[in-house]
């Protein structure tokens, strides 16, 4: 059985900061559930009940469309070394796009890796820990630089075109904030 908390405790924050990756789960009111792995140093704890992560360009933009349609969002951190533990953060998320007032407040908390496209900010309602006894042990060899090099090679115009081709809506047809912004220019 898991243990439920109302906020991120200092020991939770320490555990989160040790992890090299995390997962984000989202779903609209209909359609497919999306679970996406995230790497690099893109996660920040803003307060015991608020977190943010810098989202890098990917082949889809499901989470963005999902939280716009139905703002539910879950983060999962798993210990792959040392003491077994799974920690989930349940809450509501929103998308913060570049060139907005909120972006100007939140973006300085991050290194803006090549290909960044948005920041998710989430209000956390429940923190839940569970044992993770069945999670295998893995050793960390380092971050992959493939996505960052790809984004650098695309350049600003290439990324914009990529977003227009791949990031305008979810696989279930829900619009993304990037899509709405690009259509409105």
Image: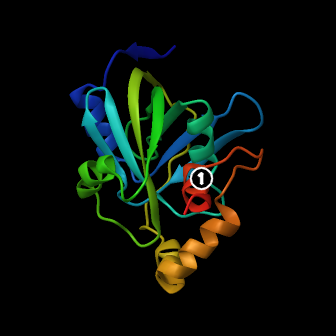
Q: Is residue 59 left or right of residue 57?
A: right
Where is residue 110 drawn, in percent x and y?
Answer: 28, 58
Tell me which residue sits at (38%, 36%) in the image. 83
Return the residue nearer the eye: 184 or 44: 184
Return the residue nearer the eye: 5 or 150: 150
Where is residue 180 drawn, in percent x and y?
Answer: 59, 52
Q: Among all residues in the image, which is located at the extreme bottom?
A: 153
Tell me which residue sits at (61%, 56%) in the image. 179
Tell me which residue sits at (70%, 49%) in the image. 170
Q: Quadrant of the C terminus?
A: bottom right
Q: Is residue 74 left or right of residue 120?
A: right
Q: Looking at the image, how many numbered discs can be counted on the residues?
A: 1
Q: Is residue 139 left or right of residue 106?
A: right
Q: Among all residues in the image, which is located at the extreme front?
A: 185
- Badge 1: residue crowd in 10 Å (few <14, some 14–19, many ≥20): few
Residue 4, placed above or below residue 146: above
Query: In terms of secondary structure, where does tag 1 sit?
Result: helix
Residue 165, placed above or below residue 180: below
Q: Residue 160 lies in what quarter of the image?
A: bottom right
Q: How is the image coloured?
A: rainbow
Residue that numbered label 1 is attached to:
180
Where is residue 27 drawn, in percent x and y?
Answer: 65, 34
Residue 88, placed above or below residue 56: above
Q: Residue 58 lies in what quarter of the image?
A: bottom right
Q: Residue 162 lies in what quarter of the image?
A: bottom right
């Amino acid at each position: 059985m898991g243990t439920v908390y109302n906020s991120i405790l200092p020991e939770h924050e320490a555990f989160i900061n040790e992890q090299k990756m995390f997962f984000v789960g989202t779903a609209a009111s209909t359609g497919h559930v999306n679970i996406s792995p995230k790497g690099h140093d893109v996660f920040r704890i803003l307060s015991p009940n608020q977190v943010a992560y810098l989202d890098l360009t990917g082949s889809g933009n499901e989470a963005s469309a999902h939280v716009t349609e139905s703002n539910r969002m879950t983060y999962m951190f798993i210990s792959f070394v040392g003491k077994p533990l799974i920690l989930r953060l349940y809450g509501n998320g929103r998308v913060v796009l570049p060139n907005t007032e909120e972006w100007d407040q939140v973006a300085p908390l991050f290194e803006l890796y090549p290909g960044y496209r948005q920041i998710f900010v989430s209000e956390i309602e429940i923190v839940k820990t569970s044992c993770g006894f069945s999670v295998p042990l893995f050793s960390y060899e380092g971050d992959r630089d493939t996505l960052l090099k790809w984004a650098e090679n695309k350049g600003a115009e290439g990324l914009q075109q990529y977003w227009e081709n791949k990031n305008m809506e979810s696989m279930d047809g829900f619009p993304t904030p990037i899509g709405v912004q690009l259509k409105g220019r």
